[in-house]
Amino acid sequence: MFSRFASRFARVGVRASAAAAAGVATGAAAFAFVAEAKATSIDINQAIAYPTVLDVVGYPAPPKDLLGDLSQLDAQPINPKGTVYLVEVRGGLDKRPGGYGHRSDSIPICNSIIAEGYKCIPIFYSDATYDKVEALLKECDGVVVRINPGEVPGVTNAKVDGLLRKIHKLGVPVMAQPEVQLRMGAKDSLVSIRNLACGMPDTYAYYEIPDMYKTFPGSIKDGPRVMKQNRGSQGEGIWICKRADGKYGAPISLDTELDLMEAVDNHTERKTVGEFMKFCEQYIIGENGQIVDQRFLPRIVEGEVRCLNIFDETVELIHKKPAEGGLSATLGSGATYTTYAPDAPQFKNLIDAFYADKPKIMASFDLPNEPFPLIWTADFITGPKDANGKDTFFVGEFNCSCVGITKQLYLCPKVAKAVDRVVSANKK
């Protein structure tokens, strides 16, 4: 009887010899597990595809309502280093055809973590299954978070964050935990790094409307500025501001006119200083409302350089060049993207300075003991030449909220090695 089940194990990638060994030792228990899995958990082929024979006999599989299509998930190691769960949500704009209901990079990431020696299972969070997800995460060795910000039916962002914070406080590595995403991903991260080589010291954040009215007129008086709202990721509410009279350094009033361009689509407007600040109040009001006021770098017309990072390693550079006559580097505004290796000679100055800053970056966010996110980006804008005639570069934005690598799946093994480093360090 058990030989039929051993052959099933073999068909999904688990060695038949291991299945047979388990059968000799615990044949009745194995048969009972198979029967229970059919009745209370997931399809048997899926059930056997992710746990191993030796560690699931008599061990309950994750509840069926937390699981999706696991047909592309590799077989798990016989003696795993530990258990890692990849947490995502059902639905949302980040789900694409070919992802089997998951993010397109979720299963490849899991398979690479499996290859690194861990049991790794993707599970779906929902408010309705909060307790079941919590029970699993409390007992695991690491959590990889792949939840894209946004509104998804049945998911309350505050509840997800609360759960992940709770798991993090229990000592389970959460990659990346909500506080890292909040401090690094918000626009005011640029204020946190203003004293690093990649930052600009004359960078300000406005959390209260009076603060903006007090500081912005003085900052725009002496040179062009960029005002960035905290919400949005495609250039919405990012305004390039210039004095219409061009008389920088001259006295300024609420009636001084500004020429404005919004990065989302490069459209232009003209408002007085007073009108513009009144308009910007909407960006301060509400949850996580804030505006960052940063010096405008005119060489933005040459584009931005996005550094794609896996943990502490920069693995790819993407030069995002705006459309002719534009300043926005988003695809929606017509920008073109060109990919470079991180050792591209024209960006050596950027990489050298960035690596010098990296040991200080997490501490600049008051998170000195937190590891880098698994996958994150830093967008650099070219600044003026230095004393040696070399380009300087300054960060215009960080992004660590579920950065996708669907087009760079070859990077999944690097993600898995980073997971191993974080989990292993936590066990010491």
Image: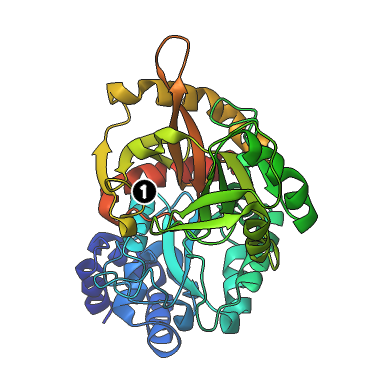
In-front residue for pair 222/88: 222
Judge left or right: residue 78 versus residue 7: right
| Residue at x 64%, y 48% (from the top left corner) | 256
The residue at which mark 1 appears reads as: 329
Residue 401 at what x, y percent from top left?
50, 56
Residue 276 at what x, y percent from top left?
62, 57
Residue found at the very far top of the displayed protein:
388
The amino acid beneath tag 1 is Ala
Seen in the picture, residue 47 relative to 408 is either above or below; the reply is below
| Residue at x 55%, y 26% (from the top left corner) | 357
Secondary structure under the numbered disc 1 in the rendered image: loop
Q: Residue 101 is drawn in which quadrant? A: bottom left
In-front residue for pair 177/278: 278
Residue 426 at what x, y percent from top left?
61, 43
Number of numbered labels in the structure image: 1
Seen in the picture, residue 418 relative to 212 is either above or below; the reply is above
Q: Residues within 10 Å of mark 1 (few under 14, many from 20)?
A: many
Residue 304 in view here: no
Q: Residue 46 is drawn in which quadrant? A: bottom left
Residue found at the very far bottom of the displayed protein:
39
| Residue at x 33%, y 56% (from the top left corner) | 333
Residue 343 at what x, y percent from top left?
30, 25
In-front residue for pair 231/12: 231
Judge left or right: residue 306 versus residue 96: right
| Residue at x 41%, y 82% (from the top left corner) | 37
